[in-house]
Amino acid sequence: MSRVDVAVVGGGPAGLAAAMEVAARGLSVRVFEKQSGIPDKACGEGLMPEGRRWLDAHGVTPLLDPAWTSPFLGIRYLQEDGACAEARFANGIGLGIRRIALVEALEQAAREAGVRIDHGASARFVSQDARRVLLDVDGVLIEAGLVIAADGLASTMRRAVGLELQPAVVRRFGQRCHFRGMPESQFVEVHWADGVEAYVTPTGPGQCGVAFLWESKRDEPARFEQLLAKFPRLQEQVNHAEPISEVRGAGPLSRRVSSCVAGRVVLIGDAAGYVDAITGEGLSLSFGCATALGPVLVDAVNGDAAVLARYAREHARLFRKYALYADALVWLSRHPPWRRRTFSLLKRAPWIFEQALALVG
């Protein structure tokens, strides 16, 4: 059996951000990532200004490959008839970035900070008591003073410690693919149609990601081409572009938890609850929660797990802000007449849109 102050289960952005906060406080930390290489998944890949500031503050920005990044100034909504409402960020600039490029930079920053990252390592919860948590990592017992579960939407750690609640009956799903040669934009563009939205995010010079979100009562996957056909203008652009990645899917998206803390196990990122990708705030929320976890880490590892209640309260505050905006947009997606009226108002009064962006950006 080996011992570590903090074990992080999951090597995506949330797990690596949390590990960096641990290392910054002089604690030993290991990240266990079940995939053998850089983990990739379907996501919008648009980082809001708040998330970009976290990268700047933690020295990650200089490590990003400029071939896989592109700044953007705000969000543009486009209706079926071509009507457009847009708003610029009032508090900075967003960053479109390929997820694998982001994780590569975060891994480099984490390793430089002293974080040990184990790829191809599957961690399973065994037990916990007042002093420690035991994990089984591919047959080897690991003892940790604290475990941070950052293993995503379908978190096995969340279920193992009894924090998962029943998911929604009507579920949302996502898909994305990348293309080279589409028109470049300084905005993330959100195209709306009945029952589905399309997100076009710049992810580097001359390239972008196209992602779809839709709702279904069944788990049968929709085909990328079927979803694209609902957006004739976008379909014409895609037809003249070159695909540069495979189609990846995710879902169901909505995940509910009873708490983000169970004894000495702490949830972060998508594992800690998720409403929808519709706001693009998932990465920024993860980084904000990692920052909120930092101040209580030393006391928690040294025996006072009760201090994790402070993290739980701050997580609830950050999550509430995100959930309010996400729930509102999902409701609009389900009620097209109201969605059209709302975006017509935003077009006439862009300051309302800008204030809404400021709340989540």
Image (spheres, rainbow, N blue to C red):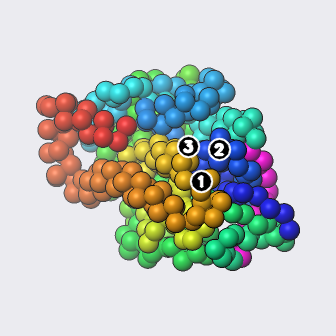
In the image, residue 257 sits, relative to residue 344, either above or below, namely below
Give the distance between the C-alpha atoms of the residues marked 3 and 2, in whole angstroms.
Answer: 38 Å
Give the magenta range.
Answer: 115-126
* Residue 25 numbered mark, or none: 2
Give the distance between the C-alpha atoms of the residues marked 1 and 3, in whole angstroms.
Answer: 38 Å
Residue 265 rendering spot, x and y as whole percentages: 60, 66
CB-based contact (under 8 Å), mark 1 and mark 2: yes
Q: Which residue is mark 3?
A: 177
Mark 1 or 3 closer to N-term? Answer: 3
Residue type for callout 1 = Leu
Residue 154 rendering spot, x and y as whole percentages: 57, 65
Tell me the quarter of the image containing the C terminus.
top left
Residue type for callout 3 = Cys
Residue 357 quadrant:
top left
| In the displayed structure image, the side of residue 45 where residue 102 appears, left or right | right
Q: Is residue 260 visible?
A: yes
Q: Say which element carries label 3.
A: strand
Tell me which residue sits at (65%, 60%) in the image: 302
Q: Which residue is mark 1?
A: 297
Residue 348 quadrant:
top left
CB-based contact (under 8 Å), mark 3 and mark 2: no
